[in-house]
Image (cartoon, rainbow, N blue to C red):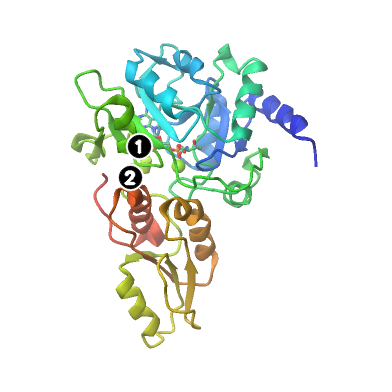
Amino acid sequence: MLPEAAVIDHAVALLQAGELVAFPTETVYGLGADAANPAAVGRIFAAKGRPADHPLIVHLPADGYLDHWASDIPRQAWELTEAFWPGPLTLILRRARGIPSVVTGGQETIGLRVPAHPLALTLLRAFAEAGGGLGGLCGVAAPSANRFGRISPTEAAHVRAELGESVRLILDGGRCAVGIESTILDLSRGAGEAPRVLRPGAITPEQIATVIGRLPAVGSQPQDARADAVPRVPGALAAHYAPATPMRLLPATDIARLASAPATGRRCAVLCHSRMAAETAALLVRQLPADPTRYARELYAALRELDQSSAELIVVEEVPATAAWSAIADRLRRAACGAGGVGKCLPAA
Ligand code: TXA
Ligand code: MG
């Protein structure tokens, strides 16, 4: 194995040349490219099979680079970066002049974050030191390193399984500590409008309120959910994060009944967090921790594993309807909606 410094040099050379590098963040693995290089960003969309009007998050080495990418930065943004960066919070701000529109999906706003994973920070800093890509803007665009609409990768092996040879280098930083994608907070709507959480994540509205002095609104606005509207947050599409196997969410009591039901011949996989019945020939059981932080860390790997089992249906035990579980509940709802093309779809929120 190459020493880390040599691997980072190789990764930086690839980014500078407009190639793709997958890297770990504390949330999920990202598929990175020089965010100022439209051809490089185009490769991300091609590798993911992602529609071109879906904007990407740009990752920065430190908050000092924010004004390369954003303009009209409100005071609240600086307060939040001070409190939560590096960390799992993405800020949506007005984009600076000259930013290629391919990275923003044609929008006037841009999503920015400084990730907390040490390998991601090492990569971003080394990229900046080596010139920082076209125009010296030092931003690495990186969506989650999965095929569009599928489960986000939380281990290097998941990235290889999802994207194969279309990514030249995958930096392996082990399993992601957070396990679900960053909280996205929209601060671009001007002083008159409350900041809005577009995607829930590990940083909660309550934590944001302790910094900016008010609770942000939560969810996309109704006009954003119009059928013909550009999806500001594909992660907010009703169907996303989905396994290929059909998936349903059920309360624990119904799952207990599944275990005692006479065999139907269909093999079913159960993902639970409270104490459940033992496995049977027809029932594969995977237990996750009952604590939301640890549950989030293991969720995507577990879903991936069950998706690859011989089960014809994945049944997930509903999680508690409390603030601590809300980001997980959000992902499970969307995953069930997209899974195997069935499931009960909710309107995009
Ligand atoms: O934790 C994360 O955020 C991970 C890691 C790799 O950083 N990244 C991630 O990227 O989840 P992606 O592309 O899978 O999801 C980014 C979300 C998308 O739903 C996108 O629509 C939204 O961010 N987004 C990006 N720019 C935006 C903008 N200008 N306005 C609204 N939403 C935006
Ligand atoms: Mg994604």
* CB contact under 8 Å: marks 2 and 1: yes
**Three-letter code, disc 2:** Leu
Q: Residue furthest bottom?
A: 262
Quadrant (top left/top right/bottom left/bottom right) for the C terminus: top left
Above or below 9: residue 159: below
Quadrant (top left/top right/bottom left/bottom right) for the N terminus: top right
Query: Residue placed at 45% from the left, 51% from the top?
Result: 296
Query: Residue placed at 36% from the left, 47% from the top?
Result: 327
Q: Nearer the viewer, residue 320 or 33?
A: 320
Kindly identify which numbered label has been placed on residue 37: none
State the image coordinates of residue 27 (x, y, percent, origin top left).
50, 41
**Label 2 secondary element:** loop
**Label 1 secondary element:** loop
State the image coordinates of residue 135 (x, y, percent, origin top left).
56, 12
**Three-letter code, disc 1:** Val
Query: Residue placed at 34% from the left, 39% from the top?
Result: 204
Q: Is mark 1 within 8 Å of ligand 1?
A: yes
Residue at label 1? 233
Q: Nearer the viewer, residue 106 or 323?
A: 323
